[in-house]
Image: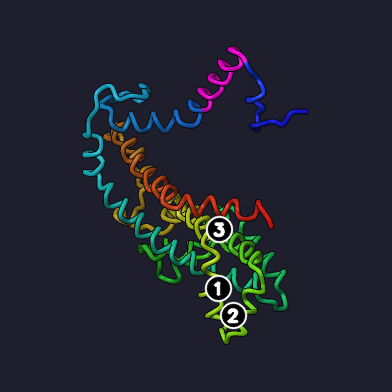
Amino acid sequence: MSRLDTALGLEERRGPAATLGKLALYALLVTVFAGPLLALLASAFNRSTDPTALTLLPTRPTLENFRAAIDRDVLLYLLNSFLVVGGGLLLQIGVSISAAYALARKRFPGLRLVFLLVLSTMMLPEEILAIPLSLVLSDLSLTGSLWGMIIPVGAWAFSILVTAEFMKEIPVELEEAARLDGAGDLRVFWSVILPLCRPALGVIGIFGFTMIWDQYMLPLLVATDARQFTLPLALRTLRADEEVGIGVLLAAALLALLPSVIAFIAMQRQFMRGLTSGAVKG
């Protein structure tokens, strides 16, 4: 039996019909996955005001949509989003690597219970947590402040578990050798464990960035003034404004999309290393 060179086995088929079939399949995949992005990009630069006029190329290119979006304080919302993501991601990574080090490299009573409790937080939808979270933030006087959007995202079970599983794969002999040289827990963590976790940091960095950037419920609970909105929340406000055309809304949506794309491109090498680090052993 010959080996399949691709997941679909396309390389085994020869001839003009097979080539046309491959081209049709590739065109379908590009249309399904890239079509909406191309339509968003084209419509953001298009002068058309008809929301049903979908095009992959701008018929009348213009920057007027972006000027109108800026007049609607989109840059302020973008700045708020960057502040929340920057502070939240730094806090989240710090908490994740610290908690993961304790869970992966230490042994203490109740370790399995702590793992179970961390895992259980991923099973609760944010709608259930909305009311108690709003009460806690109100009691701590964090409503009406960007800190109220930063602190709640500082601990994320996904990042903790991914980093902990990665740290478990680091050979114990490296840690023991460092301790023989007189290194303490902090030195072992900073000089031995953390440098080897760069691929995991790339994974939790990208997923954490996307999770915080796409937050809608949390800013909705915390913001008490429109000038405290993040960009995803502001998009809903723009959508409800009848004076805002579809081009302006799509221009703001494009601005909301770009940071996630840039973050992935910037960290894709570490991201791919993190995803494939456990695929090959030996």
Residue 96 in the image: above or below residue 33: below
Estimate the x, y position of residue 221 in percent, counting from the top left. 44, 57
- The region drawn magenta spans 15-29
Indicate which disc residue 129 carries: 3
Q: Which residue has dot 1 on it? A: 192
Residue type at numbered disc 2: Ala
Q: Quadrant of residue 122?
A: bottom right
Residue 63 in the image: above or below residue 97: above
* SS for callout 1: helix
Viewer-closest of 200 and 18: 18
Q: Residue at x 35, y 43 (%)?
A: 237
Report crowding for label 1: few under 14, some 14 to 19, many 20 or more residues within 10 A (C-alpha).
some
Do labels 1 and 2 touch, CB within 8 Å? yes
Residue type at numbered disc 1: Val
CA separation in Å, label 2 and label 3? 43 Å
CA separation in Å, label 1 and label 2? 8 Å
User: Comparing marks 2 and 3, which lies closer to the viewer?
Assistant: 2
Estimate the x, y position of residue 280 in percent, counting from the top left. 66, 52
Question: Is residue 100 found inside the magenta-colored segment of the image?
Answer: no
Do labels 1 and 3 touch, CB within 8 Å? no
Q: What type of secondary structure mainly makes up the magenta span?
A: helix
Do labels 2 and 3 touch, CB within 8 Å? no
Indicate which disc residue 178 carries: 2
Query: Is residue 233 visible in the rendered structure shown here?
Result: no
Question: Is residue 26 found inside the magenta-colored segment of the image?
Answer: yes
| Horizontal side, residue 29 vs residue 119: left or right | left
Estimate the x, y position of residue 61 in percent, counting from the top left. 24, 27
